[in-house]
Amino acid sequence: MDLKSLVRTIPDYPKPGIMFRDVTTLMADAQGFKATIARLCEPYRTEPVDLVAGIEARGFILAGAMADRLGCGFVPVRKKGKLPWKTIQQEYALEYGTDTVEMHVDALSHGKRVLLVDDLIATGGTAGAAVKLIRRLGGEILGAAFIVDLPELGGAKLIEAEGIKVHALMAFEGH
Ligand code: AMP
């Protein structure tokens, strides 16, 4: 099944020069969504995953379905100010300025084996911050899975430089 053709590309969104890779069209397709979850889970089916950590917001949709399929739990990585309990925070650089992601302090305990998931990796800023949060909580990261990689932006390389294997279902040229 050709999953790439189910991803909608929106030129110049949210700003000129960005090709927005919209996975909602892939998720809306029953066969496409099923195949996406199966392929994202494929490398980890025999791995001892304790938790899937999903990055807000599209990462939640994938991580929830993957956790169910892998028979493990789900924990959220959220933008600042959204989580109700005590959190740890990690700032990361954007093109202009910074942003912050958070996890609950008790989202995972020391030694938990965690799979990190988001819809897309671009510069790797968001996923890199999530890696730091999981490691600060004592988690061991088994891998990082994405539907889309934008290799020209170098994010996957950054995550691999952290010693984490990146699994992406497809790549697009450009930004
Ligand atoms: P980054 O931190 O640069 O790796 O950006 C990754 C986050 O931004 C992911 O949560 C994506 O959903 C979103 N994102 C970045 N670039 C794009 C793009 N071209 N199309 C769709 N989403 C994007």
Image (cartoon, rainbow, N blue to C red):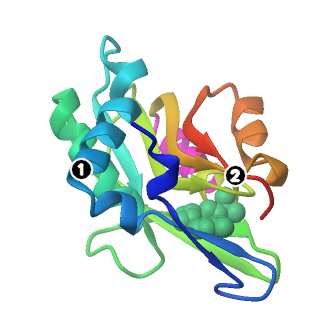
Quadrant in which the N terminus is drawn:
top left
Which of the two residues, 163 or 70, is positioned nearer the viewer here?
70
Marks 2 and 1: which is nearer the front?
2
The answer to which of marks 2 and 1 sits earlier in the sequence is 1
* Type of the residue with mark 2: Phe
Amino acid type of disc 1? Gly
Q: Is residue 112 visible?
A: no
Residue at image point 57% right, 44% down: 131
Q: Position of residue 94 (x, y in %)?
A: 76, 73
User: Which SS class for mark 1?
Assistant: helix
Q: Does residue 47 lie above or below 28 as drawn? A: above
Residue 91 counted in the magenta span = no
Q: Residue at x 68, y 25 (%)?
A: 163
Q: Is residue 37 visible?
A: yes
- Start-end of magenta stretch: 129-138
Q: CA distance from mark 2 to mark 1?
A: 25 Å
Please tell me which residue is depicted at 22% across the width and 46% down the height of the picture. Answer: 65
In the figure, is residue 141 to the left or right of 13? left
Name the magenta segment's main secondary structure: helix
**Pointer 1: what residue?**
64
The picture places residue 162, in percent across and down from the top left corner, at 71, 32
Residue 21 falls in image quadrant = bottom right
Establish whether ligand 1 lies closer than 8 Å to the Cβ of label 2.
yes
Q: Nearer the viewer, residue 15 or 90?
A: 15
Q: Residue at horizontal 56%, vertical 55%?
A: 120
Numbered label attached to residue 172: 2
- Classify 66 as above or below 94: above
